[in-house]
Image (cartoon, grey):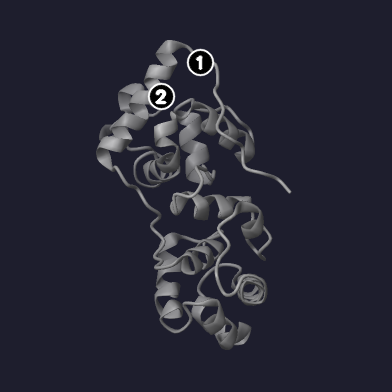
């Protein structure tokens, strides 16, 4: 089973080290405790929300889970709801039938093998239906249990534009980020990069004029004046 890349040092010049340090120092100044935009009140709700968020927006998941968690906020209650009872709550989310099967199967495993509690170890999390390495990384990092950088489309894009990574796959980008991000920022880098990509360094036309790190971005000249 694949394991998350462990933090390691990457050989970079002193100037590059200073640039990377300044990037994350500025992110810290903007938000010292960034969190997921998914709504949750417990590890179980977090695991469920993250699993539902695959190929869906956080906004759409929050709309669904606001109603869902009001009636099924524990594995026991989710099992009582059942797959057919769950579907109406999440039908507005992409791949809802597959996700419904996984959520109910996960609830069953949690009740049968973990006493109704979410195991907060990577291997145990990844053994749950629909919970891959990315979901496990999000959960463990959000709960400040294990530094991890789950690479979604936002993190992938921002990392390349900032020249933090030239990796061609999410796993390669993750390994590069874990190597280059200063250790004090590792548990928060994931959220900073996602939020930066979601609201400022957007895909089609990044908002360089509003960017707090525009002077540190090697890609700025590609977009300014377009």
What is the quadrant of the C terminus in the image? top left
Q: Is residue 108 visible?
A: yes
Q: Position of residue 141 (x, y in %)?
A: 48, 49
Question: Dot 1: within a 10 Å radius of its alpha carbon, few (fewer than 14), some, or many (20 or more) residues?
Answer: few
Question: Dot 2: within a 10 Å radius of its alpha carbon, few (fewer than 14), some, or many (20 or more) residues?
Answer: some
| Res 20 label | 2
Q: CA distance from mark 1 to mark 2?
A: 10 Å
Q: Position of residue 105 (x, y in %)?
A: 66, 74
Cβ atoms at labels 1 and 2 below 8 Å apart: yes
| Res 192 label | none
Q: Position of residue 75 (x, y in %)?
A: 55, 77
Residue at the extreme right: 1
Residue at x 61% of width, y 68% of height: 95
Residue at x 59% of width, y 33% of height: 175
The residue that disc 1 covers is 12
Question: With 7 as the anchor, is 25 left or right in this view?
Answer: left
Q: What secondary structure is marked by label 1?
A: loop
Q: Up-down: is 187 above or below 23?
A: below
Q: What secondary structure is marked by label 2?
A: helix
Q: Up-down: is 79 above or below 141?
A: below
Q: Up-down: is 184 above or below 123?
A: above
Judge by depth and name the residue closer to the eye, 67 or 126.
Answer: 126
Residue at x 67% of width, y 71% of height: 113
- Quadrant of residue 115 within the rendered picture: bottom right
Q: Position of residue 219 (x, y in %)?
A: 42, 25
The total of numbered circles placed on residues is 2
């Amino acid at each position: 089973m694949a394991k998350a890349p462990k933090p390691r040092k990457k050989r970079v010049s002193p100037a590059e080290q200073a640039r990377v340090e300044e990037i994350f120092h500025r992110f810290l100044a903007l938000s010292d405790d960034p969190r997921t935009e998914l709504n949750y009140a417990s590890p179980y709700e977090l695991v469920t929300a993250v699993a539902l968020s695959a190929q869906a927006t956080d906004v759409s998941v929050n709309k669904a889970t606001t109603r869902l968690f009001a009636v099924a906020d524990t594995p026991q209650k989710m099992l009582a709801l059942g797959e057919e009872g769950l579907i109406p709550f999440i039908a507005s989310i992409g791949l809802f039938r597959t996700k419904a099967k996984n959520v109910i199967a996960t609830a069953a495993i949690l009740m049968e093998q973990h006493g109704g509690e979410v195991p907060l170890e990577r291997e145990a999390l990844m053994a749950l239906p629909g919970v891959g390495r990315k979901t496990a990384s999000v959960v463990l990092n959000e709960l400040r249990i294990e530094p991890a950088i789950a690479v979604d489309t936002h993190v992938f894009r921002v990392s390349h534009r900032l020249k933090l990574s030239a990796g061609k796959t999410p796993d390669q980008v993750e390994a590069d980020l874990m190597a280059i991000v200063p250790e004090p920022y590792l548990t928060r880098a994931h959220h900073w990069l996602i939020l930066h990509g979601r609201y400022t360094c957007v895909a089609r036309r990044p908002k360089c004029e509003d960017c707090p790190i525009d002077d540190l971005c090697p890609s700025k000249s590609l977009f300014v004046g377009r």
